[in-house]
Image (cartoon, coloured by chain):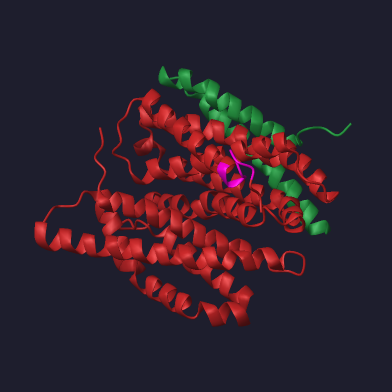
Chain colours: A green, B red
Amino acid sequence: MKSWFTVGELIILVAAILLLTSLPLLAVGRVGLWFGAQGLYFIGVSFVVGKYLSRYVRS
Amino acid sequence: MFEVSVFEIMAFVRQVSGAVAGAAGLHGWLLFNRQHGKLSRLLEPIMAAAAVVYIAAWLIGFVGYSLAEAHVGISLDPAAADLARSYVLQLPLVIVLVVLLATSRRGLARVPKLYHFLYFIVMSLLISTYAVSDNIDLKEVSYVWHGWHSILTLGTVIILDYLFFVCRHNRKLLARLTESFDRFTVFILAGLAIDIMSTYLILGEALRLDARFFFMQTVIGILLINGILLSGPLTRRAAGYLKKERKIPNPLNIILGLFGATSLVSWNTITFLDFVPNISLPYMALFAIYAAVIAGGFIGHLIVEGWPVKVRA
């Protein structure tokens, strides 16, 4: 069965959910989750860009 | 509650039109091959129209700043001084843009790829220098990245929506466009990454935990979830139908419209609040306006699709 999301998309999705979850914590001065979500976003983007570039180079 | 000046509105209009013209140049240049040449051609009118709007907004801002300094004698705060400095730097670039625009008809007919590329370069330079710091420091690098990322994000989203709009009755072109959707997604996601990085360069002075900040973070979260669902499973499903030269079913079409409207409104909201900073509405009020504009955009999409009376061309 074909999966709904690629690895990169799934990581970005989790990062977005974490970003939204981190906002109440950020309001009370706890910045860890907010930075973590952004770090995860960068990892997700690297996967998406990497996959696209590898396909582009192969074609 | 609202302290919106004409200069701020003009800065917003410049950013949106610059992003659109730059993105049209970029994607027109990249799409100009045998397979996607027709899509590239479709971008020419919007590229030229956006450049005209940019020049008009730039002129209003330029004249306004000169008058404010000469007649009122107001002392500009640092950010305003950075903006004023950019007008001086941009003047030769705007002249180049006017020349490019004046020669577009012939240029796009003879050397389309080169003209798209030139538009992209000139708009990139213009949009990256919307504010110029008095020396090259992290703030200046942040300005450049913060300005330029709009070509990859806001500009690309508008261009994509525009292409879907003009191709909506041509299934073959729509299939081509859907096939190259992941290319646009890569640009948008990378653009947002550049924007986040530009924020980190000035994090100490830029991080103010107010309602506006929390609202913008919420919009970014929504934008990402919306973008991943739209560019991932939804577009792949639509591409499946179009590949078999079948019509996209109505429910999927409606969902695509809702997600498209959310994406377009969200990027415009972020850019508007970036360039019009003196809006101090409470979080819920900002969110209510944002939701209402998305609803308006979605209804607009439904009307274009022939709702409530089914009259499709």
Asked whether B197 or B255 is in front, the reply is B255
Query: Residue at 52% across / 22% down in the picture?
Result: A22
Query: Where is residue B27 shown, x and y percent of the image?
Result: 62, 61
Up the image or down, B99 lies above or below B215; here it is: below
Query: Residue at 35% across / 56% down in the picture?
Result: B131
Q: Seen from this angle, which residue lies furthest right?
A: A1
The magenta stretch spans residue B23: no
The magenta stretch spans residue B307: yes
Q: Quadrant of the N terminus of chain B?
A: top left
Asked whether B294 or B182 is in front, the reply is B294
Q: Main secondary structure of the magenta part?
A: loop
Could you tell whether B283 is left or right of B173 in the image? left
Residue B1 appears in the figure? yes
Query: Where is residue B257 shown, x and y percent of the image?
Result: 62, 40
Query: Residue at 53% across / 42% down in the picture?
Result: B300
Up the image or down, B297 lies above or below B280; here it is: below
Could you tell whether A34 is left or right of B38 in the image? left
Residue B270: quarter of image: top left
Q: How many marks?
A: 0
Residue A37: quarter of image: top right
Residue A8 appears in the figure? no
Residue B226: quarter of image: top right
Q: Which residues are magenta?
A: B303-310
Query: Residue at 71% across / 37% down in the picture?
Result: B250
